[in-house]
Image (cartoon, grey):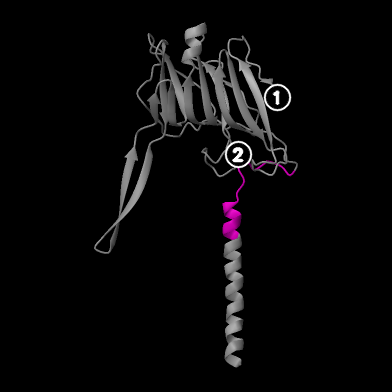
Amino acid sequence: MNEDYKAMKLYIPFLSVSLFIFASCANEAEKPKVIYETEKKTAEVSYQKIDSTEINIADLPIKFNGTNYLLHPVGNVRVYSSGSSRSGSSKLNNHVSYKISNYATPEITGLITNIMFQHKDSIALRPLTSNKMQISSVNYLDELALKTNTHLLVYTLVDVDTNKDGKYDENDIKTLYLSNINGTKFTKLTPDFHELLDWQVIDEKLYYRYIEDINKNGEFDSKDAVHYSFIRLTAEEWEPESYNPLG
């Protein structure tokens, strides 16, 4: 009887520690996509400027067919570590990647922090933005250019560390931007703290969907609201216009 009592005394603290570890892991796994600044959960965004001390590299330039501008994708050198075991000892090998982007007309994809634009007949370069970003794709609207001689680029990117983990990556809110072929008129189309779902161009309009975290719980789910908008691409000013395909 005494042995059972001693075993029970040892078991209870062990169970408490196990439950604490499980709860901690669960809380870490359930980190929201958005962490709001204040208890009021107001949708105010602060764009971070590029850190001038960061060391960047650029890919060789890309030129879309029928355009006069070179695009130099800029990003960071990435170092990957891999482990191997030989004769019971551990060895780490570092693999360095200098590749920033991939190009398959009419799209550039990758882990791009900025783009430098250059006219093909000039040595002058200008950056797309002075804000910190992680650009995942750049699309040249080639069919629109053929029909209207309007040369535009569409970007999907992360422009704010919305989950406040110190990184700009796929765990943050994805947004939609538009610019001229030379990088000017760089314009955000989705509202702050609204997650881009998808987009497509039909004739001279850019249609896109995005989701709003209406209950401000930091997650995007079936309880939130999906919005629909379009842009008239040949208009002088790109003003989003809302529409409701559900009637």
Picture residue at 44% right of the left edge, 17% below the top: 117
Point out residue 120 in the picture as x, y percentages from the top left corner: 38, 11
Q: Is residue 31 magenta?
A: yes
Q: Quadrant of residue 49?
A: top right
Picture residue at 39% right of the left edge, 24% below the top: 104
Read off the residue under disc 2. 162
Read off the residue under disc 1. 244
Q: Secondary structure at mark 1?
A: loop
Point out residue 192 in the picture as x, y percentages from the top left corner: 65, 31
Is residue 125 shown above or below 134?
above
Is residue 9 shown above or below 185?
below
Task: Specify whether 219 is left or right of 68.
Answer: right
Quarter in which the N terminus is drawn: bottom right
Point out residue 56 in the picture as x, y percentages from the top left corner: 41, 31
From the viewer's side, name the closer residue of 148 and 188.
148
The outermost residue toward the left is 87
From the viewer's side, name the closer residue of 2 and 43.
2
Question: Which kind of residue does numbered mark 2 sit on?
Answer: Thr
Point out residue 158 in the picture as x, y percentages from the top left corner: 54, 33
Mark 1: give few (<14), some (14-19) or many (20+) Cα within 10 Å.
few
Magenta region: which residues?
24-39
Q: Is residue 29 magenta?
A: yes
User: Given this view, does label 1 or label 2 mark the residue nearer the observer?
Assistant: 1
